[in-house]
Amino acid sequence: MEVIVKEKVQQIIDQFAGKDVYVHLETTNGAYASHFDENAYNVGAFIRNAKVKYEHGKIVGSGNAYRVGLKLDLGWLYAEGVTDYELDDQNRLLMAGHDREGRLMVALEISETPFSHESVGQS
């Protein structure tokens, strides 16, 4: 993955607009929270292969982290804290946010084909 270049990511987001796409969205502090602080809550959200069609998408922010929002017919889908991206060899836009230790905190992925459902953690 590469560090976000807002203009490049915006161009890729625009290429998926108006198409039926599959979205993977995940947030987590996973075991990180309770591993270091037994009183901390583990939190997370996970959705994989949600089929959506967004009108337009937008990446906003500057500096270290960005918010990526997708405007749907009846609302928005967004991920906050995205730091890195990759357009892989299957033409999937993979975006992620990592903490200072490199651990995954948020992921937003967009594809015209469904993501693998064989095992969590493999796109």
Image: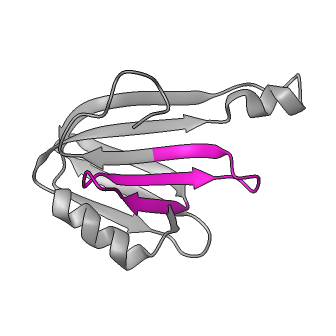
Provide residue 120's location: percent of width, then percent of height: 47, 26
Expressed as whole percent of the image width and height from the top left, the position of residue 116 reads: 32, 29
x then y, percent, for residue 48: 35, 29
Residue 100 is a magenta residue:
yes
Relative side of 76 to 82, left or right:
left
For residue 51, above or below residue 58:
above
Instruction: Say left or right for 102 vs 75.
Output: right
Q: Is residue 28 above or below residue 2?
A: above
Query: Residues in magenta?
Result: 83-107
Residue lying at 25% horizontally and 46% vertically, measured from the top left = 111
Name above or below for residue 41 compared with residue 108. above
Name the quadrant containing residue 44.
Answer: top right
Is 55 contained in the magenta span? no
15 vs 120, nearest the viewer: 120
**Can you give x and y, in whole percent of width and height, for residue 12 in the image?**
27, 66
Q: Quadrant of residue 52?
A: top left
Left or right placement of residue 123 versus residue 104 in this view: left
In this rendering, the count of numbered labels is 0
Residue at horizontal 34 percent and vertical 44 percent from the top: 77
Residue found at x 75% / y 57%: 100
Please, is residue 85 above or below residue 44 in the view? below
